[in-house]
């Protein structure tokens, strides 16, 4: 299976050379992070002063657009949402920007996405306040995503593979489409409105008790940070500056050496 990181490493430089002047800074940063993920560029070398053993550790880029680093985050987020569920009916609404606004949105991502969040939430709240519909406040979760939700049967799957193959092997087109999912640095892509907003969580808990909906069990996972920075190791969630590595031979604490740089062939 071809990984996105491998596509970027093989064709990223050529893509940046061709479109560099028109690329957003966030796109450049994301590509560089994924290209360096779990390579010597983000690695450390540890040595044991007792027996001379050497260990190489390659860390994650922690970029929120990196598929490898974010694997499993969706399940953790899902577990956290269980505490806010009520025993009522839910609806999924999709708001889509007109195609005429795509160029403007790409040039003003933060402003356009903020407006999309605010206007869609305001429209729902306005309709909900009408006694003909709900006549009260709604609770909503807004999630930013691209492409209209679409699903169709593909039989054995061969049809889907034939459709995807040209995009996978036309690296330039694949990279262009992937970059359309990249958000501005620090942009919050999940937002809560109405009685689901953070300031009304106590009221939500009281509402759950009133309708006899006990809180779900707390998930074992810790708070998930949505960040672009490399602050902790993806496997252990231990700050890199505090990570303790013990020698596999004698068990003594190994000393961390300067960050590895990708010069020539990487160590095994």
Image (cartoon, rainbow, N blue to C red):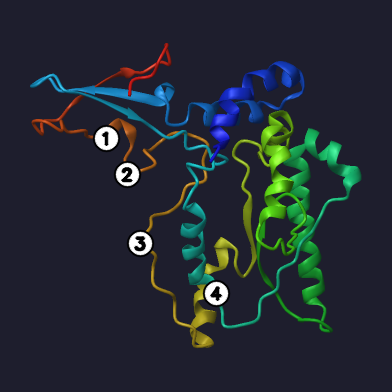
Counting residues from the N terminus, which is met first, the one under dot 4 or under dot 2? Answer: 4
Locate residue 90 relative to residue 127 in the image: left or right. left
**Residue 64: percent from the left, percent from the top?**
54, 41
Q: In the displayed image of the protein, which residue is found farthest to the right?
A: 100
Nearer to us in this view, 161 or 233: 161
Task: Tell me the residue that label 2 is attached to.
Answer: 236
Determine if residue 175 is in view. Answer: no
> Is residue 145 depicted above or below 205 in this figure?
above
Q: Are marks 4 and 2 in contact (CB under 8 Å)?
A: no
**Residue 258: percent from the left, percent from the top?**
31, 17
Locate residue 154 relative to residue 195 in the image: left or right. right
Question: How much space separates mark 4 and mark 2, taking CA atoms?
Answer: 30 Å
Counting residues from the N terminus, which is met first, the one under dot 1 or under dot 2? Answer: 2
Q: Are marks 1 and 2 in contact (CB under 8 Å)?
A: yes
The disc label shown at residue 243, or none: 1
The disc label shown at residue 85, or none: 4
Task: Tell me the residue that label 3 is attached to.
Answer: 220
């Amino acid at each position: 299976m071809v990984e996105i990181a491998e596509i970027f490493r093989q064709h990223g430089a050529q893509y940046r050379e061709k479109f560099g002047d028109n690329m957003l800074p966030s796109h450049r940063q994301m590509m560089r992070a994924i290209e360096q993920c779990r390579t010597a560029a983000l690695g450390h070398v540890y040595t044991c002063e007792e027996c001379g053993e050497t260990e190489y550790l390659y860390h994650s880029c922690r970029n929120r657009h990196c598929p490898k680093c974010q694997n499993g985050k969706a399940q953790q987020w899902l577990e956290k949402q269980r505490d806010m569920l009520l025993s009522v009916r839910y609806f999924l609404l999709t708001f889509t920007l007109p195609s005429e606004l795509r160029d403007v949105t790409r040039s003003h991502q933060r402003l356009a996405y903020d407006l999309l969040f605010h206007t869609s939430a305001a429209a729902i709240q306005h309709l909900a306040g009408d006694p003909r519909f709900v006549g009260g406040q709604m609770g909503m979760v807004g999630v930013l995503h691209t492409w209209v939700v679409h699903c169709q049967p593909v039989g054995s799957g061969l049809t889907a593979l034939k459709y995807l193959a040209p995009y996978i092997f036309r690296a330039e087109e694949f990279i262009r489409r992937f970059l359309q999912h990249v958000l501005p640095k620090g942009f919050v892509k999940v937002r809560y409105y109405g009685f689901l907003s953070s300031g009304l969580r106590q009221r939500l808990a009281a509402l759950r008790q009133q309708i006899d909906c006990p809180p779900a069990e707390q998930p074992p996972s810790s708070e998930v940070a949505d960040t672009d920075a490399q602050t902790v190791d993806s496997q252990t969630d231990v700050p890199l500056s505090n990570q303790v590595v013990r020698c596999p031979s004698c068990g003594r604490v190994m000393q961390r050496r300067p960050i590895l740089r990708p010069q020539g062939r990487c160590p095994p």
